[in-house]
Structures are given as C-alpha cells and as structure tokens.
Amino acid sequence: MGRLDANGDGALDLEEFQRLSPAARLRRLFPGRAEGPQGSAGTDSGPVVADLSGRSWTPMRPAEGTKANVLYFVVDGCPVANQFAPEMSRIARDYADKGVAFLLVQVDPDVSSAQAAASSKELSLDLPIVLDGKQDLVARTGAKISPEAAVVAADGSIAYCGRIDDRFGKLGRQRPEPATRDLLAALDAVLKGESIAHSRVARSNIWGLLKLGAKVILCGPPTLVPRGMERLGCEVAYRLDDVLHRCDVINVLRIQFERQQRGLFPSVGEYSQFYMMTQERVKKAKDDLLILAPGPINRGVELTPEVADGKHSAILDQVSNGLAVRMAVLYLLSGKMPAGE
C-alpha cells in the first residue's frame, strides 16, 4: 500500500510535501477519477466482491436498508493495525444495530485467504474479510496507509477516509487515550445526515462564541467551508483581506494534511497567499488584533513564524489555558464538587 509520507507516521507534513516531485504533488492534489471526490455521490455501485465466507458485498454502495459501509484497510502484520483490533471490534458491535456494515479489507497482495482468516482470528477481529490484493478499493476510496477507515454513505459517496483516531502521533509516540475519535465522529455525522468535511472544530467554536455574544466570520476557500454554515448564525467569507479590517480576533485553524486524501485547493502556496497571516496582513488589521490558534499550527501555511511568535499572538496561552478549562469542566461534570463551592 503506497505511502507519500517519508517518515512513515501516516501524516504528510509540509516539508514532506515540498520534497515530493512536481508529478507526485499533482497526484496528491488531483487524484484520478477512480478515487471519487470525498462527499460526491458515486455513479455506480462499484465492484461486487465476496468475503471469505462467500457472501457478496458492494463495498462502494451500501445494501438496501444499510446506512453506511465502513471499509477498514489493513496490511497483515501491521503493528498499529493490530493495536486497533479491539477498538474496531467494539465500534462494529456498537454500530451494528444502527445500520452500519463493516468490512475488513486486507490489501496485502501476498496474503492468502487462510492467512487473512488466521490473523483476524488471532486478533479476535470478527469482521467479514475481503481481499483487495489489486487495491481496487484502495484506489476508489483514496486510502493511503494501514490502518485506515473509509465511510461510504448510503448514496455511495465517500463521506470520510482517514485515521481511526489520533492515538498514534509522530515518531512512534502514542497517547494513552485518543483526544479525537475521527471515525466515530464521521459515523455519527453520516447517521445524522450531517456534513463532516472540515467542520468539527469550526462548528464547536461557532457554537461557543455565539453563546458568548461574539460576531463570528468563517473565512476560507469554498472547498473547505461546509455548506449551510450561515444557518448556525455566522457570516461566511472567502477572502481574508476583505474582512480582516473588521476583526478583533483571528482564530487560525490548522490545515490537516493527514486528512487531505484529495486536493481541496490547488497548492499549499496558493492557500498561503490568500489566507496566511503575515506581518503585512497584521499591519492592515486593528492595532490591538489578537491572534489565536487551538494548536498545533503549520508555520508557513496558516501563519508565518514572525506572526506566530509576535506580540499579537496568544497561541501558547490559549493552548495552556485550554487544558485547565477542560480539566475544570470535567471536574464540574463529575459531580464531585463539594456543596457550597
């Protein structure tokens, strides 16, 4: 299964992106038609495949009465995939009664049916197994690494393709518990009929800020701004320079290269030209402009190092305070606060 990331951490960092050849960048930003753009409806039901028990499936088009298919891509013996086996078994059990079908897609061309079945049994991963040695399903969904999951909605659109959660970071670092459960969020959104593309952080920020009485402007390329965000009560803009002079605070959200399975803007350079916070843009803004970001950030993409570390930036304070606020909220919700406090 091909990787674009040089260090093998499952994320395409800016430096790695810049090291790609021009042809590889084009393939990364403009994948072939076979992959199908995320969120677009498929034109056919795709291939009919049989699992190891002989049952027929149309992975790219959920069966009648099924609300979504989840394709769980693995390479046999992948240590990260092995560690996710209990989590995927739990997710499959939890969503079985919600109309979601799960398929374990073994992409290693050298793995036999017997090997795939034995590996799944050893890991107690009780999912229907499909062999995809020619990586047809990989190409259709745009999956890049092992493990990875694709969510195919009832209309055949690829609603999500990416990591299961953020448990594993760079350089082999692992969190005891994931901070974001991407696959669960995608499934819940699909079952509710909501758009999931690039909206989770923006959506939660909009809800909170509006509750506090702020006026919110959501600004970004049209391909990254989910439809219907105006219904939440915010203003939508597509040119930062048109609204910058009106802003008291700029809250910068990171471009998540690890989720950019398909190009949603022509190039990183073009995105930076129109949306990166630079010293020149800071000079055009209000004198007391405050620059925030939930972290982490891509320096040289969303903002320059000078702006990130400059006098208008409160990013480090925001990240530190965010941890304390979350701890306080969890403490209050736990009900352990003594009466009278």
Image (spheres, rainbow, N blue to C red):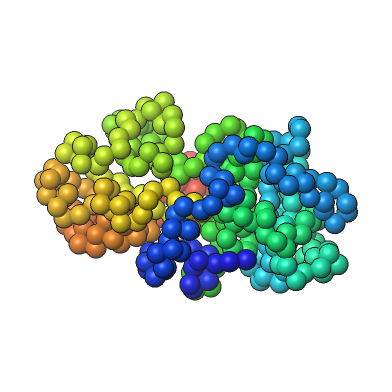
Q: Is residue 44 left or right of residue 204?
A: right
Provide residue 104's location: percent of width, then percent of height: 74, 56
Question: What residue lies at 60% left-to-right and 32% top-to-bottom?
Answer: 192
309 left or right, relative to 172: left
- Name the one closer to the observer, 279 or 12: 12
Q: Provide residue 146's location: percent of width, then percent of height.
A: 62, 64
For the C terminus, give its image quadrant: top left
The extreme right residue here reads: 53
Q: Residue at x 45, y 44 (%)?
A: 198
Residue 58, position as x, y percentages in the image: 75, 44
Quadrant housing residue 73:
bottom right
Q: Which is nearer the eye, 337 or 13?
A: 13
Viewed as shown, does residue 244 lie left or right of 155? Answer: left
* Residue at the image position 58 percent from the left and 42 percent from the top: 159
Please report the residue visible at 16 percent of the width from the left and 39 percent of the height from the top.
Answer: 245
Q: Is residue 114 visible?
A: yes
Against 75, residue 32 (above or below) is above
The residue closer to the viewer here, 303 or 159, is: 159
How many marks do you count on the picture? 0
Residue 45, horizontal then vertical, whole percent: 70, 40
> From the image, which quarter does the N terminus lie in?
bottom right
Q: Is residue 308 left or right of residue 331?
A: left
- Residue 185 shows up from this direction: no
User: Which quadrant of the view contains residue 178?
Assistant: bottom right
